[in-house]
C-alpha cells in the first residue's frame, strides 16, 4: 500500500517549470505587497502643496508626481505579471491533466479484451 501512495504522489508532483513559476510568483507577490505598503505609508507619496508656489517648487512637484506615477505603474505591471504567471501555471496543470488522461486511455487500450469486459461477479 505505501508503494501505491508513492506512485500517486510522484504522478502529481510539481514539474520544474511549475516550481519555477510558483517561486517567481511568491517573489513578485512579496514585492507587490512591500511596494504597496511602502507607497501607502511613506510620507514621500503623500501630496503636499506649499502656500507659495514658485516656478522651482512647481517643477519639483511635477517631478515628484511623475516619480509617484512611475512607482505605481511599476507596481501595477508587477500585478499583471502575477496574472501571467497564474495563466502559465494553469497551462502547465492542464498539460499534466492531458498527459495523465492520455496515459490512462493508453493503458486501457493495451489491456486484453477479456479484462476490459468482465461481467460483475455476484
Image: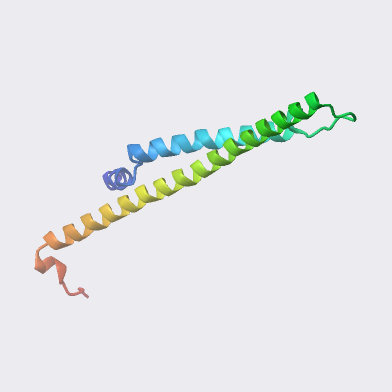
Report the side of 23 relative to 76 (left or right).
left
Q: Where in the figure is residue 14, as x and y percent of width and height?
A: 36, 41
Q: 37 or 5: which is nearer to us?
A: 37
- Say left or right for 122 vs 83: left
| Residue depicted at 17% across the width and 62% down the height | 108
- At 23% across and 57% down in the image, what residue appears? 102
Q: Is residue 26 left or right of residue 8?
A: right
User: Image quarter for residue 112?
Assistant: bottom left
In the rendered image, the vertical position of residue 11 relative to residue 102, given as above or below: above
Query: Hey, which quadrant is residue 56 in on the image?
Result: top right
- What x and y, as percent, mark residue 27? 51, 33
Q: Name the residue furthest front.
A: 55
Viewer-proximal residue among 94 and 14: 94
Q: Which one is nearer the viewer's eye here, 72 or 23? A: 72
Q: Which colour assignment does the render follow?
A: rainbow
- Residue 10 vertical position relative to residue 49 in the rendered view, above or below: below
| Relative image position of residue 58 (x, y in whole percent) | 78, 29
**Measuring 22% from the left and 75% from the top, which residue is drawn there?**
122
The image quarter in which residue 3 lies: top left
Query: Residue placed at 33% from the left, 45% from the top?
Result: 9
Nearest the eye: 30 or 77: 77
Amino acid at each position: 500500500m505505501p508503494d501505491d501512495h508513492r506512485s500517486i504522489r510522484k504522478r502529481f508532483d510539481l514539474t520544474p517549470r511549475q516550481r519555477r513559476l510558483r517561486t517567481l510568483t511568491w517573489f513578485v507577490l512579496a514585492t507587490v505587497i512591500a511596494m504597496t505598503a511602502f507607497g501607502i505609508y511613506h510620507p514621500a507619496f503623500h501630496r503636499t502643496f506649499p502656500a507659495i508656489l514658485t516656478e522651482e517648487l512647481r517643477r519639483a512637484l511635477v517631478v515628484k508626481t511623475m516619480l509617484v506615477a512611475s512607482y505605481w505603474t511599476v507596481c501595477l505591471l508587477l500585478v499583471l505579471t502575477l496574472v501571467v504567471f497564474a495563466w502559465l501555471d494553469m497551462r502547465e496543470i492542464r498539460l499534466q491533466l492531458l498527459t495523465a488522461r492520455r496515459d490512462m486511455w493508453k493503458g486501457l487500450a493495451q489491456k486484453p479484451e477479456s479484462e476490459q469486459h468482465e461481467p460483475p461477479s455476484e
